[in-house]
Image (spheres, rainbow, N blue to C red):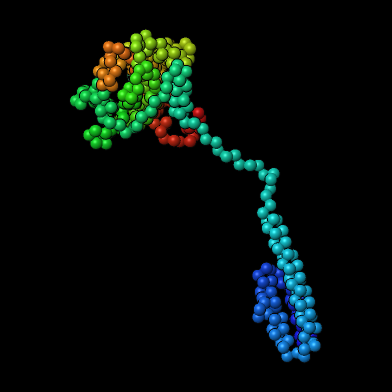
Amino acid sequence: MKDKLEQIRKNAMEALKELDDLKQLEEFRVRTLGKKGELTLVLRGMGSLPPEERPVMGQLANEIRSAIEKALSEKTAELKNAALEKRLEAETIDVTVPGKMPRLGKLHPLTTVMNELKAVFLGMGFDVAEGPEVEWDSYNFDALNTPKNHPARDTQDTFYINEDILLRTHTSPVQIRTMLKQKPPIKIICPGRVYRSDAVDATHSPIFHQIEGLVVDKNITMGDLKGVLDVFAKRVFGPKTQTKFRPHHFPFTEPSAEVDVTCAICHGEGCRVCSYTGWIEILGAGMVHPNVLSYCNIDPEEYSGFAFGMGLDRITNLIYGIDDIRLLFENDIRFLKQF
Ligand code: PHE
C-alpha cells in the first residue's frame, strides 16, 4: 500500500506540471482527490491491513493528500495569474490616441428666439400661460367673437377632429381659458404651436408657432398696447426700430391693427427682405372686443384690454435671415448647426 500511495504522489506531481488550463486542473482534482479518486480508492483498502499498520498508512495518505492539494492550489494560482496577465495585455488602451469629440447639441433657432421673446415680455411683467393644442371649437372661435358661418373662419383653414374639437389655429383660446378662470388684472403671453391646413411652401407650414399677448385691467388703452409693442420691437430688432400701426380687422379686437416694424436689414431704406418698402409686418393686435370680455364674464364697462399675436417662425426667419420656413421643420443638422 505504501508503494501505491507513493506512486500516486509521484504521478500526481508529474501530471500537475503538464497541466496548463483551469478546466484540466479541475478534472485532475476529481480524478485524484475526489470521492471516486485514486487516493480514496486506495484508502478504502485500509480495512485489509493489519491494525498496527493502519495509523501509519493513514498518516502517509493524509500527508500525500495535503501535498497534492498544496501543489494543486499553487498551480491554480499560477494559471489564474497568467490568464489575468494575458487579459491585461490584450486590453491595454493607448491613452495617447486623440479622443473623439462627442457632438454637442444646441437649441433649435425657434427655441432660442422663443426664449428671447419670452424674456422680453417677462421683463415687462407678463406671465406665461399655456393651453392644449387640441382645443374646443368654441374656445378657438365662438368665444373669440367668431361664430359658425363667420367669414373670418375661412381665413384660418382648420383641422377638425370632430365637430366640436379641432387643432387650435392660434393661441388665442389660451387667453379665453385664462380669462375664464382668472379675474383682471391679467397680463399674459401665450406661446405655442398652432395648426392650419395650409399647403406647404416657402412661407407656409401647416404647423407653426405663435406668441400672443393679453392685458386686461381697468383703463387699459391703445396707448398701452403701442408702448408695449414699441418696447418689444426695440428689444428684439434693435433700439432704432420704429413701429407702425395700420388699420385692420380681426373679429376679436376692435379697433384692430396690423403692426409693422422698420426693416432690420436696411433700416427703412428698402431692400429685398422688406420688398423695398422699408417696413416688415410682424403682428396683429387690437383692443379686446367687448363681446370677448363678456363671454368670459368680464364686464366691458369696467374693464378693457389689448391683445396681440405674432408668428414666431416668421420672426425667427427675420432675425436669422432664413428665407424658407420649411428649413425650420426639416431637422437637417447641416442647417441647424449654423445657429
Ligand atoms: N389670433 C390672431 C391670428 O392668429 C392674431 C391676433 C391676436 C390678432 C390678438 C389680434 C389680436 O391671426
- Identity of the residue drawn at 73% across and 71% down: 72
Question: For residue 87, which quarter of the picture?
Answer: bottom right
Residue 24 in view of the camera? no
The correct choice, above or below, for 203 with respect to 245 in the image is below
Q: Is residue 127 left or right of residue 11?
A: left
Report the residue that reaches farthest toward the front: 51
The correct choice, above or below, for 156 with respect to 35 in the image is above
Where is residue 337? Give x, y as percent.
51, 32
Residue 218 in view of the camera? yes
Where is residue 246? Give x, y as percent.
32, 12
- Identity of the residue drawn at 47% across and 31% down: 108
Q: Nearer the viewer, residue 155 or 228?
A: 228
The correct choice, above or below, for 199 with respect to 60 in the image is above
- Identity of the residue drawn at 34% across and 20% down: 183
Where is residue 243? Give x, y as percent.
40, 11
Question: For residue 1, which quarter of the picture?
Answer: bottom right
- Identity of the residue drawn at 37% across and 9% down: 223
Report the residue that reaches farthest toward the left: 149
